[in-house]
Image: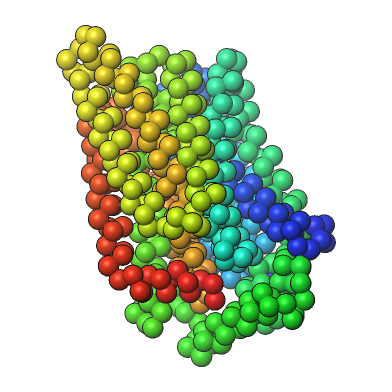
Amino acid sequence: MFKTPHYDWYGKGFRLRAAITIACQLAFVLFGYDQGVFSGIVGNPDFLDTFGHPSSGLEGIIVSIYNLGCFTGCILAFYFCEKTGRRLAMWIAMVWIIVGAVLQTTAFSVPHIMVARFITGIGTGIETSTVPMYQSELCEAEKRGRLVSSEPLFVGVSIVIAYWFDYGMSFTTGSIAWRLPIACQMIFAFMVIIIVFGLPESPRYLYKHGRSEEALQILCDVYDGTPESPKIAKENRDVLEALKVEQEHGEYRWSQLLKRDEVQTGRRVLLAYGMQFMNQMGGINLVVYYITSVLQLNVGLSRNPSLLLGGVINLMFFIGSLYPTFFLDRIGRRKPMMWGSFGLGLSMMLISILLSFQNQGGKLAKDTSSASVAFFFTYMLIFGATANCIPWVYVPEILPLHVRAKGTAVGISSNWIWNFFVVMITPTIINNLQWKAYLIFMCLNFAFVPLVVSHDSRPSQLSRLSLSFRH
């Protein structure tokens, strides 16, 4: 356990809670920015010249190795987050990101850019395993869905920022057109580092490590009350009771993550893993990372219209994410995921059908290919409104305290390993399979619908799973 420097910059109550939320949102800006920035870079002439015009397979590896680094960061978070605490873990994540960004900015060879992106990914993996849990542990239960889902909303914000930055820089020549957008991610990392100096440690982490008085004081500061305040007294009592149960049974080991016990620990961990699997395997990163290439290769547009349309399509991601940010605590988790998966599958099906007419040539092929662009818009809008935010709320929400750090890391690792898989294969499948590539994601999205519906087959148990986080 480590004690990190802390400065009382934000006082108590609302200002402190706002600072916590802003820090978490900025951390997710980094997450989205590094995903979005490469969408407009991979086709840049100077970028291609610098790295020897990589084949579609090598291009997929260069881009996707970042996600493999994120997975590695999750593995590292497994082992040290419970020792370092949430604040120090966030600092460590930012250092990895800054080092990786410097190396990416100065890259002149394929091995150099690959190592740099892997290092950046390690920081992002640590960050995404820590930040949603930290936000969840420092907010009221009735506001948790809205606050945690605001973090993926800022993924959408940063993807849009990165994409339009790329578009603006596409009118310049030389390496600055792609090096400057990559370098600018360091701005957000330094902002997070500074803000975290004034933030408290997670009270649940402090309780677990025997620092009960400090944890109680943080609860008083965050909720601007006294130990006798009903909300603070209840939070204090609930956490201590949960820790007592954990101590009676001993600390959970990795081998016990899938254990069938009275609180269904194994089922919760599997649900956490599965929800993040669905988040990635619906095909979102085919669009986020490669929309410019898709519009050029599959739709047949020239580069400048592809860049413009790609920017507006990514804007739909942000617009859609506004819906759960404001309404998720009212609409629940299951129904939006069910209808969202159906809508995503339908969008992929229509894209595939419209692109399939290209083989016939002529005006029909041109018109139907152009019409497919509308369903890229629809896809991103639906994803932002459903599958973007909900998994990030759902994962820490269903995991009990005794397994929350390990279980969250398992869930987030699912996000990154399948993210890596999709990003790696996308250049190859959009080149070789063309319109048939979208059928893969159509089938997966439609398959997710009955899986989500089946979660409702034992409603009383799922109610207990959702409610248990409040304790």
Viewer-proximal residue, 120 or 471? 471
Which residue in the rendered view is the most extreme toward the top? 362
Relative to 34, 366 lies left or right: left
Q: Position of residue 301 (x, y in %)?
A: 37, 16
Residue occupying the point 56% across, 26% down: 164
Residue occupying the point 34% across, 30% down: 375
Residue occupying the point 77% across, 76% down: 226
Quarter of the view holding residue 284: top left
- Position above or below: 327 against 301: below
Q: Position of residue 195 (x, y in %)?
A: 74, 52
Residue occupying the point 47% across, 40% down: 320
- Position above or below: 412 against 285: below
**In the rendered view of the protein, which quadrant contains the C terminus?**
bottom right
Q: Is residue 417 visible?
A: no
Relative to 19, 273 lies left or right: left
Quarter of the view holding residue 90: bottom right
